Amino acid sequence: MNAFRAPRSASLALLTLVNAPHLASTQQLPPLPEPVPVLALAQAPDRSVWAGTYGAGIYVLRAGATTWEHIAHSTDTAAHSISWDFVHAFGFAPQGEVWYGTVGNGWGVSLDGGKTWTNWELKQLGPEWQYVAPNGIVTRGDTVYVATADGIKLSFDRGATWAEITDSAGATTAQHVWGRIANQYVLAIAAGGDGSLWIAHLRGLARSRDGGRTWTEYPTSDRGRALMVQKDGSVWVGTEAGLYRFDPVRRARLARVSLPAVQSLAAAPSGDVHALTLDGVYAATGKRLGCDAAPLVTCRPDHGALPDTAVLALRHTWFARPIALTDQPYIDQTYRFGSTMGGNFQQHQGVEFNNPDGTPVHAIGAGVVVFAGPAEQGSNTVAIRHDRTLKASDGARFLFSVYYHNSALLVTVGQRVNEGDVIARVGNTGRATNDHLHLEVHASPYDSVSLIVDPNERYPRYTTNPELWIAPLAGTGVVAGQVWDADGRPVQQARVYGLGKAEPQETPYAYAETYGEHNHSDPAYQEHFAVSDVPPGDYTLTVTVNDRQLTRRVRVKAGAVTWVEFRPDAH
């Protein structure tokens, strides 16, 4: 699910009910020791409560306890810790096993209540299977199913051996294919009381009645993001546009309601379904031919007052997006341009589009291919010098786009391409830990390919934030701005909280980081951070500068760039 910071007006007890299908009843939970975005909440059979967080690992509230126990990643291999502190999935098996899944570094299991862990990460899995779906672990007896962006891994023996459920492309590399599905990029998984398994993937829904061996596919254009199976065999499906109930016998929707993007679903004692969305919590009642939904808690306040921002005239035109809307067009929000994921990685020089191997990569604009071949650590790479240039205050800039990690290149140096042409296929070649496209946009004063693609240069000189260059998704806008300290200097790697983004749930948005010393502002905007694909509305942004929390009101408009500045009072 998307990173969710509990609103002050909402109790954690209600969030627990909504976000943890295993919870038998609501209960008042003590606050977490730090104000960290919670990605997953679940209750184990022993009634302990498990909270997965964005960057702070796992918190456990043991049965009868009043304080949280903290479980975090350790670099000491003898500690047998969890592999990664970005946790958004839990599963519990009958013999006391506790499974967890991460955003980008596999999963693990504990047989002693969380004291020690056995993990499956890059070393064990290779450059696939790293991105577990939100709430993407289910157990059925002694079998565990881990849903990921590369298909489903299942084990009957606590992970001693694994089999795979994947599509035709994934089957070429999977070692023990257990079943086939139409698309390996799994978005959600759920188990029914009748023994069925349901999944949602990029091409629709699928159901298995034999433990994942065979599947019945139900193609649909609106992607499921959360599933809950009913006793009658139907399934509630939370989507990017709302909620519906699907009957597999009639292959029909029995109920539908428009809501903000649904993050997770849970059954309420009343028999209703509770849907957690980015804007709040809704209670939905299914009917034979329709559906009613009413808000329980609203998370986004109505500010009323005028925003502290301005809508800027666009300072350069948009390029197109490199991934089609029918594939997975969302930008990975955990490792955005300039991000370090809270200090875990180097300052990122581009943006990621996580997609299955073989997904078409499209040119974002017209131009000439100036590089096509292996680059850093063998990454299959394409670079395009675009026809248009940028007029900046310090002179004209040549514009380049670069596409890394492809499995196949479909263009050659010197070839002209138009916007939208398929130039490559998504892969994981080079320094990659999953199937994805890494896109960079360079604004260079020099027409020099060596300054754009250099296998020995980790921090190219002229990269800019692609989120200010590629068109935001329809109906969304961009927020950009600056953060200054009391001496008038840019504040590096500051965390800007407060924006809300529903997608992508598998790599959720929590905060924006201002750029570090190895990142570059857009020559036209001179921003310190920028976030695209933000739904319109009012937001309150906060950032801490010189030990002082600064707050700004932001009003986002579709198709526009909203500008905001943070400046503490000078001393």
Image (spheres, grey):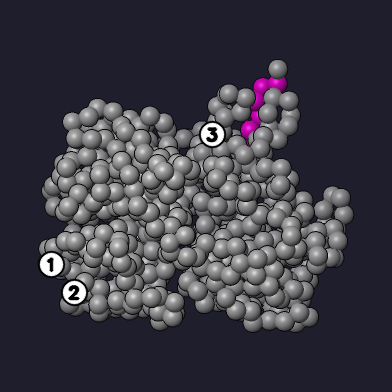
* Magenta span: 563-570
Separation (CA) of disc 2 from disc 1: 8 Å
Looking at the image, tell me whether mark 2 or mark 1 is earlier in sequence order.
1
Callout 2–callout 1 Cβ contact below 8 Å: yes
Q: Magenta stretch containing residue 307, yes or no?
A: no
Mark 2, residue position: 209
Mark 1, residue position: 194
Residue 68 against residue 209 in the figure, above or below: above
Residue 282 against residue 415 in the figure, above or below: above
Residue appearing at x 47%, y 35% in the figure: 304
Asked where in the image residue 549 lies, by quadrant, the reply is top right
Asked where in the image residue 527 lies, by quadrant, the reply is top right
Q: Is 250 positioned to the left or the right of 78 in the image?
A: left
Q: Magenta stretch containing residue 567, yes or no?
A: yes
Quadrant that contains the C terminus: top right
Residue appearing at x 42%, y 37% in the figure: 36
The label number, if any, that marks residue 411 in the structure image? none
- Find numbered disc 2 in the image and state the secondary structure of the residue it sits on: loop
- Find numbered disc 1 in the image and state the secondary structure of the residue it sits on: loop
Q: Is 208 positioned to the left or the right of 526 in the image?
A: left
Mark 3, residue position: 542
* Residue 66 image point, x, y percent: 24, 27
User: In the image, what residue type sits under mark 1?
Assistant: Asp
* Residue 99 image point, x, y percent: 29, 52
